[in-house]
Image: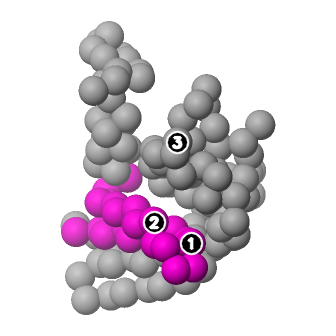
């Protein structure tokens, strides 16, 4: 497993570790599904110990960091964007990603369920 970052103590961590630590910090578990017909993303965010957040995600970005595409989910704020979701995407999917213009979001907290679509922008360069 490739180590892509370091903790403040200098320990190497993988992309999976980074995703897990981000979710732990934000208080949710997540699942990213890439669906075929039509090609689309579905992100499920589960909040096992909290209510649904007041603010929905307002934008998703696909960014490429030295060959590794990431899907970032952001909430719009008065000062810009707050990145609340971050997931690695298999580089072999990059060509298919260019045709996806929105992300289906499912948020779960207890018996509450909220579903909505969020625009997806591509920043491959």
Numbered disc 1: secondary structure: loop
Please tell me how crowded label 3 is: few (under 14), some (14-19), or many (20+) other residues with Cα within 10 Å: few
Residue under pointer 3: 91
- Please give the range of residues in magenta: 26-48
Q: Quadrant of the N terminus?
A: top left
Question: Is residue 44 one of those drawn in magenta?
Answer: yes
Task: Say which label, 1 or 3, has the lower sequence index.
Answer: 1
| Percent x, y of residue 16 | 31, 39
Identify the residue at horizontal 36%, vertical 43% (top origin).
19
Q: CA distance from mark 1 to mark 3?
A: 16 Å
Q: CA distance from mark 2 to mark 1?
A: 7 Å
Residue under pointer 2: 34
Numbered disc 2: secondary structure: strand
**Residue 83 shows in this picture:** no
Identify the residue at horizontal 32%, vertical 29% (top origin).
14
The mark found on residue 39 in the picture is 1
């Amino acid at each position: 497993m490739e180590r892509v970052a370091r903790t403040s103590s200098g320990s190497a961590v993988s992309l999976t570790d980074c995703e897990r630590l981000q979710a732990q910090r934000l208080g949710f578990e997540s699942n990213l599904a890439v669906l075929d017909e039509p090609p689309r993303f579905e992100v499920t965010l589960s909040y096992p110990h909290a209510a649904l957040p007041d603010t929905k995600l307002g934008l998703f970005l696909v960014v490429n960091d030295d060959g590794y595409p990431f899907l970032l989910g952001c909430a719009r704020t008065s000062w810009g964007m707050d990145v609340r979701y971050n997931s690695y995407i298999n580089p072999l999917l990059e060509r298919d990603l260019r045709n996806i213009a929105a992300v289906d979001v499912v948020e779960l907290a207890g018996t509450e369920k909220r579903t909505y679509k969020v625009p997806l922008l591509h920043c491959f360069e």
